[in-house]
Amino acid sequence: MNVEISDIATLPTRFGTFKIQAFKERMENGCFKEHLAIFTDPLPETPIVRVHSECLTGDALGSSKCDCGDQLEFALHMVQSQGGMVIYLRQEGRNIGLLNKVNAYALQDRGLDTVAANHQLGFSADERTYEMVERILHHFEIRKIRLLTNNPKKIESLTRVEIVERLPIVVEANPHNEAYLETKKRKMGHLL
């Protein structure tokens, strides 16, 4: 895996002060994806780790259609208070990209659920991969983690690190994302 790694910088936030380090991944098609490790210093021996995939609409715009922004805030609060890392992966829209995500939203506006919308566009329910997570954890010499997730695919995908505990992310549903969360639970096996 061809990865360029930045220096470590300090990032003061409304959640507290973190350290950050960027990882520029060269894809097989020649494109790049830049991921970010947001972490406390020092890291505990067995840190809490949240693997969070980019969601512009939820993370930056506060969309109520999903729970992504709420999950990111929950994770940043927990990592800041207990020590650990948020790995922010550039995999917008479960890795279908922003344009396709907006098209999927349009299909959801017409009645399809999130999985059916992805299928209608020619994608699987979840196109994300997690090899970069293991690369980042290896870089920090992290061998054991407390994984903050509701997604069983993340648990299954991380094979080179010991997951000593799965910590649930508990966020409130709202009228705009209730059906979305039910679909994630029913069709994708999320532990909600």
Image (spheres, grey):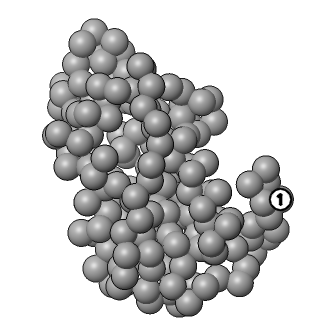
Nearer to us in this view, 30 or 174? 174
Q: Quadrant of residue 178?
A: top left
Q: Residue at x 48, y 55 (%)?
A: 52
Which quadrant is the N terminus positioned in?
Answer: bottom left
Q: Residue at x 42, y 32 (%)?
A: 173
Q: Amino acid at mark 1?
A: Pro
| Spot occupied by residue 93 in the image (x, y as percentages of width and height) | 40, 39
Residue 48 percent location from the top left of the image: 52, 72
Question: Can residue 127 be seen?
Answer: no
Q: Which residue is mark 1?
A: 12
Q: Nearer the viewer, residue 155 or 83?
A: 83
Residue 91: image location, x then y, percent: 44, 49
Q: Is residue 139 left or right of residue 157?
A: right
- What element does badge 1 sit on? strand
Q: Is residue 87 left or right of residue 8?
A: left
Label 1 CA crowd tier, 10 Å (few <14, some 14–19, many 20+): few
Give the image location of residue 70, x and y in percent.
54, 41
> Residue extending furthest top?
110
**Could you tell whether 61 is left or right of 113 in the image?**
right
Q: Is residue 116 visible?
A: yes
* Residue at 79% in and 70% down: 9
Compare residues 153 and 173 and report the one nearer the observer.
173
Q: Quadrant of residue 94?
A: top left
Numbered disc total: 1
Q: Is residue 60 above or below residue 71?
A: above
Q: In the shown orientation, is residue 143 left or right of residue 189?
A: right
Taking depth in this image into account, of 146 and 110 the one nearest to the observer is 146
**Residue at point 64%, 57% (across, down):** 77
